[in-house]
Amino acid sequence: MKRLLAVCLTAFATTHALADVDAAKAQGIASKNMCFSCHAVDHKVVGPAYHDVGLKYKGDADALVTLTKKVKNGGSGVWGPMAMPPNPGISDADLRVVLTWVLAGAPTQ
């Protein structure tokens, strides 16, 4: 029962957060943290397009936690052989803004 409640609350929080996407702020943070060196909104660069990431994790209640770990610690093998370097310098608050935007499909407005 506790697990079900936790999942429901996480899903609600994620859904509510996705409704409050600030695309301009998210893009500014991503730019400041060099995310656009390897990613673009709508096409693969070195890493996947943010639209594709949003689609892959759509409906995944754990996506925000999963992607936070991947950004902070780096990762590989999900999108091909190229490893994503860790980005431990981005603040948790800034990362939440960017990932909320990505999980919303990386809208431009």
Image: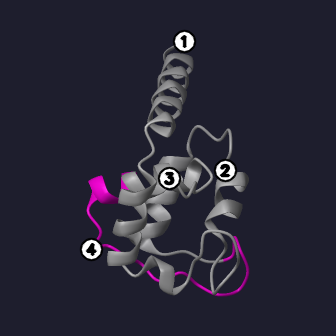
Three-letter amino acid code at disc 4? Gly
- Percent across and percent down for residue 42 are 68, 70
Decide: marks 4, 3 in contact (CB < 8 A)? no
Q: Are marks 2 and 4 in contact (CB under 8 Å)?
A: no
Q: Tell me the residue that label 1 is attached to.
A: 1
Region in magenta: 77-96
Badge 3 is on which residue? 101
Q: At label 1, which amino acid type do we have?
A: Met
Report the Cα–Cα distance between label 3 and label 1.
31 Å
| Residue at the image position 49 percent from the left and 86 percent from the top | 37
Name the colour scheme: one colour
Cα distance between the residues tagged 1 and 4: 37 Å
Image disc number at residue 57: 2
Query: What is the three-letter code of the residue carrying label 3?
Result: Trp
The first of marks 2 and 3 along the sequence is 2
Discs 1/2, front: 2
Asked whether the beta carbons under mark 1 and mark 4 sit within 8 Å of each other, the answer is no
Amino acid residing under circle 2: Tyr
Viewer-nearest of labels 2 and 3? Answer: 3
SS for callout 4: loop
Q: In the figure, is residue 1 to the left or right of 90?
A: right
